[in-house]
Image (cartoon, coloured by chain):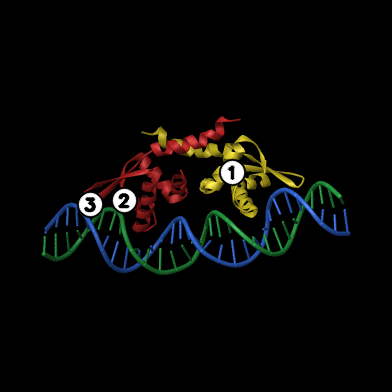
Chain colours: A red, B yellow, C green, D blue
Amino acid sequence: MNIIFKALNDTTRREILELLKDRDMTAGEIADQFNISKPSISHHLDLLKQAGLVIANKDGQFIHYSINTTVMDEMLKWMLQFKRKK
Amino acid sequence: MNIIFKALNDTTRREILELLKDRDMTAGEIADQFNISKPSISHHLDLLKQAGLVIANKDGQFIHYSINTTVMDEMLKWMLQFKRKK
DNA sequence: TAGATATTTAGACAAATGTCTAAATAATAT
DNA sequence: ATATTATTTAGACATTTGTCTAAATATCTA
């Protein structure tokens, strides 16, 4: 839970998720969308991966990243507890 | 958006929200639930207030805090965008 | 095998964060 | 008025975070 909130607490990482919502992308393609160095993006991707929010798939020299929304279900469930009770 | 994620990115603050889910509490009552100094709790409450997640109401020398779930709707909406699209 | 391309790892550094103690502010009670 | 209670503000400090550059690793191509 902690690690998920941590991963989402950064604009760049949230934007990465929004990109991956539409289609899978390689690390390089993702980095091209930001004015941030590739190592920094790599670090962001690592945090997202640790949180289980993205999945990395190696394909030759490329690494394809895809979003994993099942992890978000846990967060959605956490948030909904506040709406249920009066 | 940013400030909401920031506010939720801390276990103590999330636990405060879970306490307030059941009933309104004063700053002192909230602080009593944690092994953290009152000034630190005060700071956490301030961040939650800035994010709009709680509302403070002064009543004499007490300040009653209550949860405001409408702000969470924005977050829920953000999260649901990932579930909608295929 | 060498060189180019894709990505990560390592290490440094400034800024942000969570915590504390001491002091300030405000309201209540004696 | 003074002391007590509730809460916040101020300032300090160690830890975490986001970023960078330089170097390492891995794959592909000529």
Q: Chain of mark 2?
A: A
| Dot 2 alpha-carbon crowd within 10 angstroms: few under 14, some 14 to 19, many 20 or more | some
Closest to the observer, C13 or A81: A81
Q: CA distance from mark 1 to mark 2?
A: 38 Å
Q: Which mark is residue A27?
A: 2
Residue that carries the numbered disc 1 in the rendered image: B16
From the top left corner, tell me how far across and down residue B24 is, in percent.
66, 38
Q: Which mark is residue A61?
A: 3
Q: Chain of mark 1?
A: B
Q: Identity of the amino acid at label 2? A: Ala
From the top left corner, tell me how far across and down residue A53 is, in percent.
38, 43
Q: Chain of mark 3?
A: A
For the point 64% across and 45% down, the residue is B30
- The secondary element bearing badge 2 is classed as helix
N-terminal label among 2 and 3: 2
Q: CA distance from mark 1 to mark 3?
A: 46 Å
